[in-house]
Amino acid sequence: MPIDMTTFRLTTFLTGIIGLLTAETVWPARAWKTLRSKRIIFHACLSTFNTLVLRVPAYIPLVALLNYMNTHQIGLSHILKLSPAVNIIATVILFDMFDYWWHRFNHRIPILWQFHKVHHVDTHVDTTTSLRFHPGELAFSFLFKAVWIVLWSPTLWAYVIFEASVTLAAQFHHTNIDFPDPIENGLRKVFVTPRYHTAHHTVNQRTGNNNFATIFIFWDKLFTTYRIPDFEEMKYLGLPKGRNIYLKITQTLTAPFRNIY
C-alpha cells in the first residue's frame, strides 16, 4: 500500500482514538466500574497483537486483489464505469451495508458468534471497546471483505476511505459519551450514535440482538432491526457469563474454543 494511504489510515485512527478518549474523559456518560487504565492497556495490547499478527499481513493480499481487479477492470463498479469520486461514495455506502449484514451474521451464525462474543463480553462500553476483537473474528472478516472486493471492485482509495470511515464510526459509537436529546435525535436520523450502539451492548436481547448498523443507521431501519435505546437496559452491559475474566488475555484468546462466555 502506498505510504500516503498508510499515513492517511494511521492518522485517521490516532486522531479518532485520541480525540474520543479525551471527549469521554471530559464528558463521561457512565462511571467506569473497572480501573480505566487497565482497560486502556489491555485493549491497546490486544489491538497491537491483532495488527501485527493479522491486520498487516492480511492487507497485503487484499491490496494485491484490489490492484488485480482494477488493473483488469473486473467487478460491478467497472461495469457501471463510475468516476473516482462516485466510486468512493458508492463504496462507502455499499460496503457499510455489507458490514451491517456481516455484523448481523456474527450474531446469528453460531461459529461466528463464538468469536464475536469476545467483543460483547466487555462489561463497559467506551472508546477502547472499538479495539476489542478476537483475531479469529478478524480473519473471517478479511475473507468476507475479499468477496466484497471481487463483487464490487472499489478503487484502492475508495477502499481505504471506507476502512477509515468504519474505524472512525466504531470509535465514535463506542465512546462513553451521550448527547442531549435534540442533538442525539438529529444525528440519529443518519448516523449510529454512542447511545444507540451502547444499547446494542446490553445484556437484554431486545436491543442486544438488534441495532447492527456501523456508519449509517438507515440499514437497521430498512432491515427491521432498529430498536430505541432504553436507559434502564443500558445500566447492565456485556454478557451474563465471563464478566470477571474479560480483561484476562488467555481467557480472551481461548474463549471461542472453550465456550466460557
Image (cartoon, rainbow, N blue to C red):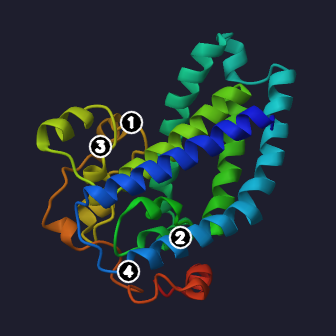
Residue at x-position 20% and y-position 32%: 186
Foreground mark, 2 or 1? 2
In the figure, residue 230 lies in which quadrant? bottom left
103 and 224: which one is in front? Answer: 103
Percent of width and height locating residue 196: 27, 50
Percent of width and height locating residue 115: 56, 70
Task: Determine which of the numbered discs, if any, sits on residue 43 in the image.
Answer: 2
Q: Secondary structure at mark 1?
A: loop
| CA distance separating discs 1 and 3 | 14 Å
| CA distance separating discs 2 and 1 | 26 Å
Question: Could you tell whether 179 is left or right of 59 in the image?
Answer: left
Q: Up-down: is 116 above or below 145?
A: below
Question: Could you tell whether 253 is left or right of 18 in the image?
Answer: right
Task: Determine which of the numbered discs, if any, sits on residue 224 in the image.
Answer: 3
Residue 223 seen anywhere in this rendered image of the structure: yes
Percent of width and height locating residue 118: 50, 73
Mark 2 crowdedness (10 Å alpha carbons): few <14, some 14-19, many ≥20 = many
Foreground mark, 4 or 2? 4
Residue marked by disc 4: 35
Percent of width and height locating residue 144: 65, 48
Mark 3 crowdedness (10 Å alpha carbons): few <14, some 14-19, many ≥20 = few
The disc, 1 or 4, on the residue closer to the chain's N-terminal end is: 4
